[in-house]
Structure formats: C-alpha cells, structure tokens
Image: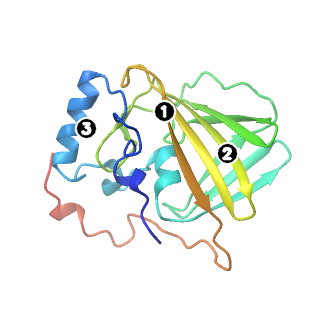
Amino acid sequence: MEVPQEFLNIGWSLKEGPPYQPWAAQARKERAEQNGKDDPVSRCLPGGVVKLHTTPQLRKIVQIPGLLITLNEMDATFRQIFTDGRPLPEADLLSFKGYSSGTWEGDTLVVRTTGFPDGIWLDRNGSPLTDAATIIERFRRLNYGNMEIDVTIDDPKAYLRPWTIKLHHKIVLDTELIDYICTENEKDVGHMVGK
C-alpha cells in the first residue's frame, strides 16, 4: 500500500504550506531535519486523528444508530464518533484521538474533535498539534469505493489561522484488519538517534 504524501508532509498540497506560528515553524523545521527520528509514533505512542487518515495501515468503519466507530490497524486501536447529537464535553482527561461528535449535513458527515494533549505530530516532519486544537472532518462518499475527507485544523497556539487539506480514500476489498502493535518485538528505540 502506498504512503500518502500527507503522512510525510501534511501541507504538501497547500501553495504556501500550513500557516505556522513562528515557534511551530521552527519546531517543524528542526524535526524535519532529523527525518522524523523523534516522531512520537516512532516511540510507539498513538499518532492521533490526522495520522489515522494518512497512515497506509487500514481501518474499518462501523456505523450504528448514534455512533460511528473506526477500528484501526495502527496499534490495534479504535475511535468513537458520537452521532447522537451530544455536544463535545469539556475534556478533563486528554486523549490522542480526542473526543468526537458528528452531525449529518446532507450526505456529508461533519465531525468536530477536541481534547488533544500537546505533543501530537500531524505528519512525519513534525507539524505540531496542541491542546487548543479543534479538528473538523467532513466525510463524503463520492461513489462506491471512494471517499473524500476534508480535514480542517484550527489550532490558534500552533497556526495563524485554520487551514484545510483534502484526502481521498479508497475501499480495500477482500481483506481483514491485522493487529499492528508497535511494541511487539520492538527493537528500534535503542538504535534511534535524536533527542
């Protein structure tokens, strides 16, 4: 399976790139120079919502009344998106996948997610996400087998203004999810160079 450009550089399709705050631009520059060696995912920490969209590992979407669940090969995890009309809670316990609430606007599922901890990377080059972030995803099925996802990052601590990327996903038929557990037989951390 091919690695999407956004996995390496989340803003590659934006003419001027993401509108980083000065500290965030510097952090991303330093992280990119290290070729992602300090990426939290390289240390077996969860990648967050955006990396779930850009990793080449598969996911399965299960929808029942009031709830959409994604089952993710990446670290054999899950994500809950409540579609029962509940508001986003005040997050007292932060989560790598945040807290998600979705509503339907015609044939588009609009999901708002908050409650992230500081330190999540949006891509392998280290574009930051902070605890002030709200991510808005707009899922739209184009036809059988093709889905478009607009992802808007609204994080005033890290970016000068909200910005949006468009992702395209294709259905993968005749396969099942396989457990991918980063720590299972992990041998790389002892050989990594970086901070």
- Relative height, residue 117 to residue 50 (above, below): above
- Which of the pair 136/186 is nearer the observer? 136
Q: In x, y percent, where is residue 157? A: 38, 20
Mark 2–mark 1 distance (CA, rounded to whole Å): 21 Å
Q: Residues within 10 Å of mark 3 (few under 14, many from 20)?
A: many
Q: How is the image coloured?
A: rainbow
Dot 1, crowdedness within 10 Å: few (<14), some or many (≥20)? many
**Lower sequence index among marks 1 and 3:** 3
How many residues crowd around disc 2 within 10 Å: few (fewer than 14), some, or many (20 or more)? some
Q: CA distance from mark 1 to mark 3?
A: 19 Å
Query: What residue would you read off at disc 1?
Result: 116
Q: Which residue is mark 3?
A: 28
Q: State the SS at label 1.
A: loop
The earlier-in-sequence mark between 2 and 1 is 1
- Nearer the observer: mark 2 or 1; the answer is 2
Quadrant into which the C terminus falls: top left
What residue is disc 2 on? 139
